[in-house]
């Protein structure tokens, strides 16, 4: 599992590509994110195959999990997650 570094004052964009998860003709119709306490979602977006979030905040030395769940036009649901650690400045 890869853990991405982030500074406590950084505002960073993260994204997921669901292109290879979806069957031909299917597309994302909704996206929701779950963030650890202490993090702030500055912006969220999605297209037919991609999702993105801009995240700020976090406590130095802490690790966080961020999860994204999408629903598709065919009624399927997919969830992906990643982790990052807040580094000292």
Image (spheres, helix red, strand yellow):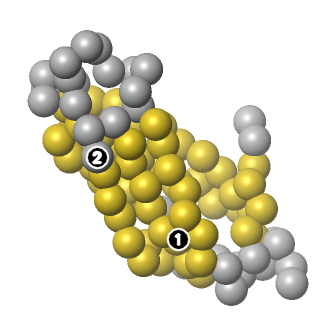
26 sits left or right of 54 in the view: left
Report which quarter residue 8 is drawn in. Answer: bottom right
Q: Position of residue 23 (x, y in %)?
A: 28, 14
The mark nearer the N terminus, 1 or 2, is 2
26 sits left or right of 62 in the view: left
**Cα distance, mark 1 to mark 2?**
18 Å
Numbered mark located on residue 55 in the image: 1
Q: In the rendered image of this protein, does residue 59 appear above or below residue 16?
A: below
Position of the C terminus by quadrant: bottom right
Position of the N terminus by quadrant: top right
Q: In the rendered image of this protein, does residue 30 appear above or below residue 62?
A: above
Nearest the viewer among 26 and 58 is: 26
Q: In the rendered image of this protein, does residue 62 appear above or below residue 24?
A: below
Nearest the viewer among 52 and 58 is: 52
| Mark in the foreground, 1 or 2 | 2
Residue on which the image places disc 2: 47
Residue in the picture at 35% in, 64% down: 44
52 sits left or right of 78 in the view: right
Residue 37 appears anywhere in the view: no
Q: Position of residue 85 (x, y in %)?
A: 75, 62
Helix, strand or loop at mark 2:
loop
Q: Are marks 1 and 2 in contact (CB under 8 Å)?
A: no
Helix, strand or loop at mark 1:
strand
């Amino acid at each position: 599992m890869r853990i991405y570094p982030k500074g406590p004052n950084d505002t960073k964009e993260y994204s997921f590509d669901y292109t290879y998860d979806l069957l031909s003709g299917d597309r994302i119709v909704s996206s929701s994110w779950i963030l650890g306490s202490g993090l702030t979602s500055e912006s969220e977006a999605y297209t037919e195959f991609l999702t993105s979030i801009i995240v700020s905040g976090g406590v130095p030395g802490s690790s966080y999990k961020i999860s994204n769940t999408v629903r598709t036009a065919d009624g399927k649901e997919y969830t992906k997650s990643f982790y990052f650690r807040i580094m000292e400045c």
